[in-house]
């Protein structure tokens, strides 16, 4: 029988079940990490804005990056590499980290295992200032995890275990906590399933929240049908170009984005890798170039774009400026290893976005 344990912000909870004690030393670890962290957004009094409150729901993953991969050793042979690093990730978890660094007040909701990987993921999210009270823990399977061999050009194939992300159900979410925020970001609606994800988004919008959705699976027409209930309640859909073309069968991104608008999405912001982003609404379409940087690892760039774009819109920026913030945030993440790469805050990203760093005209 599956057991789901419900976490709360103080690392202890009484929800509908018994009190759950976190592993020995975990609370001290999380507090120590938060205090010692040099991440700019940790409880600073001089935040660059009135804090936007954002609920992030869905996929949370622990990534292990292996840098400097040129080939997979044959047989049982070994290979020395310069760096191995773990980081919080996922279309919810990674976006939560970046939003928190940019100064938002972030509450994270999802499912992780009761294993050591789950402990590590929680500690890293706490270190980044993310409220983890909405994360539930399951004894049925492990925490979702990926192993990512990073090539010299930044490409990153991956081995992935779905794990606890597949266990999350709508009834595991404390909806009263979700709607305390002003915006709901749903990362990976495929795991909740279209009807349940649509119900969640509809509930959020009926309570005054704006919404955004980032899909995880590769695009195909079957997936579009599966998440059809999601789109009418989605203010901002945040796919990449391959997903748009796969979902719609369109010959180009603009046409595909317009197909997604016709399916119900309010606005479609499409990431295009080194080409930047294109944003399409009923009123306009804008293209924003990528920034010229030395790419180290592109893991989490889509999540970083989502964070910058969402926050830009929450702060009243127009579509072009929000997309530029998204591209600037993605550029900072791509210049290091993992979604939590580097040390930046909103002021750093905004200054970078205002400069002339475009990779293309």
Image (cartoon, rainbow, N blue to C red):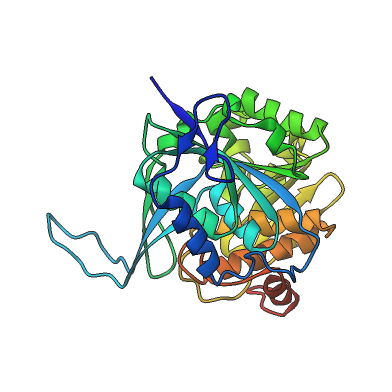
Residue 222 falls left or right of residue 201:
left
Residue 337 falls left or right of residue 46:
left
Question: Seen from this angle, which residue lies furthest top?
Answer: 1
Question: Seen from this angle, which residue lies furthest left?
Answer: 76
Residue 345, image x and y in percent?
A: 66, 69
Residue 106, image x and y in percent?
A: 66, 51
Quadrant location of the N terminus in the rendered image: top left
Which of the two residues, 212 or 222, is positioned nearer the viewer here?
212
Question: Total label count?
Answer: 0
Residue 273, image x and y in percent?
A: 57, 60
Query: Is residue 298 in view?
Result: no
Query: Is residue 179 in view?
Result: yes
Q: Vertically, is 96 above or below 17?
A: below
Which residue is located at x 43 percent, y 51 percent?
A: 26
Which residue is located at x 46 percent, y 47 percent?
A: 61
Residue 97, image x and y in percent?
A: 58, 56
Residue 275 falls left or right of residue 82:
right
Q: Vertically, is 6 above or below 41?
A: above
Quadrant location of the C terminus in the rendered image: bottom right
Q: Vertically, is 248 above or below 199?
A: below
Using the rendered view, name the quadrant where residue 188 is placed: top right
Which of the two residues, 155 or 26, is positioned nearer the viewer here?
26
Question: Seen from this angle, which residue lies furthest bottom?
Answer: 356
Q: Vertically, is 328 above or below 271?
A: below
Using the rendered view, name the quadrant where residue 354 is placed: bottom right
Which residue is located at x 55 percent, y 72 percent?
A: 38
Which residue is located at x 59 percent, y 24 percent?
A: 171
């Amino acid at each position: 029988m599956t057991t789901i344990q419900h976490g709360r912000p103080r690392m202890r909870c009484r929800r509908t079940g018994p009190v759950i004690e976190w592993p020995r030393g975990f609370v001290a670890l999380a507090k120590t990490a938060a205090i010692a962290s040099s991440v700019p957004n940790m409880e600073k009094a001089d935040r660059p804005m009135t804090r936007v409150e954002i609920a992030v729901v869905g996929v949370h993953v622990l990534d292990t990056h292996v840098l400097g991969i040129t080939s997979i050793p044959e047989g049982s042979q070994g290979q020395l590499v310069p760096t191995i690093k773990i980081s919080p990730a996922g279309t919810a978890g990674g976006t939560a980290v970046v939003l928190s660094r940019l100064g938002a007040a972030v509450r994270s909701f999802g499912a992780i295992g009761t294993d050591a990987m789950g402990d590590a993921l929680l500690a890293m999210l706490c270190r980044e200032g993310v409220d983890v009270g909405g994360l539930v823990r399951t004894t049925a399977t492990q925490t979702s995890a990926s192993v990512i061999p990073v090539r010299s050009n930044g490409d990153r194939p991956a081995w992935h275990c779905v794990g606890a992300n597949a266990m999350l159900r709508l009834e595991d979410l404390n909806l009263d906590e979700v709607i305390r925020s002003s915006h709901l970001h749903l990362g990976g609606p495929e795991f909740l399933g279209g009807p349940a994800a649509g119900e969640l988004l509809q509930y959020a919008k009926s309570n005054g929240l704006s919404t955004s959705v980032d899909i995880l699976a590769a695009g195909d027409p079957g997936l579009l049908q599966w998440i059809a209930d999601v789109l009418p309640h989605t203010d901002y859909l945040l796919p990449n170009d391959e997903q748009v073309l796969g979902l719609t069968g369109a010959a180009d991104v603009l046409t595909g984005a317009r197909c997604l608008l016709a399916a119900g999405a309010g606005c479609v912001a499409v990431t295009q890798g080194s080409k930047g982003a294109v944003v399409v609404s009923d009123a306009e379409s804008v293209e924003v170039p990528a920034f010229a940087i030395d790419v180290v690892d592109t893991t989490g760039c889509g999540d970083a774009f989502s964070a910058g774009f969402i926050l830009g819109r929450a702060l009243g920026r127009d579509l072009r400026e929000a997309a530029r913030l998204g591209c600037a945030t993605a550029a900072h993440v791509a210049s290091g290893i993992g979604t939590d790469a580097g040390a930046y805050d909103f002021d750093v990203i905004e200054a970078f976005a205002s400069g002339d760093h475009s990779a293309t005209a």
